[in-house]
Structures are given as structure tokens and as C-alpha cells.
Image (spheres, rainbow, N blue to C red):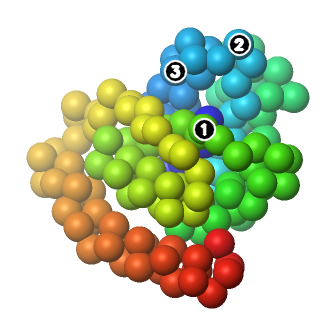
Amino acid sequence: MIIFGAAVRPDGGPSPALRDRVLAALRHGERLSPQPLYLPTGARGRFGPEESAVMAAILSEAGVPATRIVQETSGTDTLSSVLACVRLLRGIGHAGPVLAASSPYHLPRCVALLRLAGLPARPVRTCGMPASRRWTKRWYWRLREVPALPYDVALMLWYRLTGRA
């Protein structure tokens, strides 16, 4: 189960989106597999520790053994996170299937990139954007994906053609 990162708050705690992604992964992971492997991904952003470390702490607090949490700490964006996770999973001999946990607006890009990288991926939806967000903010995140999806897909195809993915 790959859990894609989101912002860490200035106090080092998880943003609502980050917490939501981890909780969705927990809900689906335990239901679908007796011993799921959780792969939180995300480097250090503007604040606090790495996104992956904050997610790993939430997983640990929920009772997930450390042996079932593998942090990917180098991903600074969706594409680099996918590439790093694919390398990591191949390195441990895992060829799929893979579940991807992220916010609803972000999932199509995550799943498309994982599939283009050769992993059979399925989405795990979170409950979505927190209700307290303004509609302008919600639409900002959705519209941001319009150029990001084809851009990252084109880059992933290039990486595949050049043997870097």
C-alpha cells in the first residue's frame, strides 16, 4: 500500500489531507490483506520532518508493526515518489498488485503513473477534502491536476523509453 504524502504542519504534525490518506490506507489495508506492507512516501517539505516519517508515526500509533512499514523519504513530488517506490518494491521482489492511497483529486495521476511504471495499481480513496476548506481551495487542487497529469504521464513515458523507470 503506497501512501502518497501531503503537507506537514509547522508544528510537525500531519495536515488533514495527510492524516486522511493514512487512515484510508489503514482501513483498506487490514481489510484486504492479513499483513499489508505500508509504504509511506514523501521527503521533508517546508516544515517538520519528512512526510513519510509523520505517516509512519500515525501507522505505528495505530498498531502497525515496524516490520510492515517501509518509508520512502526521497520523493519530492508525485512522479519522483512513484519512481522511488517502484525501485523500492522491485528491490524487495514485489511486483504487485499495489494499492495507492491519496486524495480523490490526486488518485488518477498516482494510479496512472504506477501503471505506466509497470505495477498493477488500484486506488484507495480517502474521504476527500476537509469540509472546512473554501470552495476556491477545493477547485484549486482539482484544477492543478489538469496540467499535472499529462505532464507527469509524458515524463513517465520518456523515463520508460530511456530505461530509467
Residue at 87% over, 29% down: 67
Count of labels shown? 3
Please tell me the numbered disc located at residue 28. 3
Q: Residue at x 83, y 47 (%)?
A: 93
Q: Is 28 or 72 nearer to us in this picture? A: 28
Task: Mark 1 vs mark 2: give the one in front.
Answer: 1
Q: Which residue is mark 2?
A: 34
Q: First in sequence, mark 1 or 2: give its number.
A: 2
- Give the residue at mark 1: 97
Question: Alpha carbon of mark 3 to alpha carbon of mark 1: how far?
Answer: 14 Å
Q: Name the residue rendered at 69%, 34% in the picture.
A: 38
Residue farthest bottom in this picture? 162
Residue 77 visible within the image: no
Residue 146 against residue 34 in the figure, above or below: below
Q: Tag 1: residue type?
A: Pro
Q: Amino acid at mark 2?
A: Pro
- What's the residue at 43%, 73% (across, down)? 152
- Mark 1 crowdedness (10 Å alpha carbons): few <14, some 14-19, many ≥20: few
Q: Name the disc covering residue 107, or none.
A: none
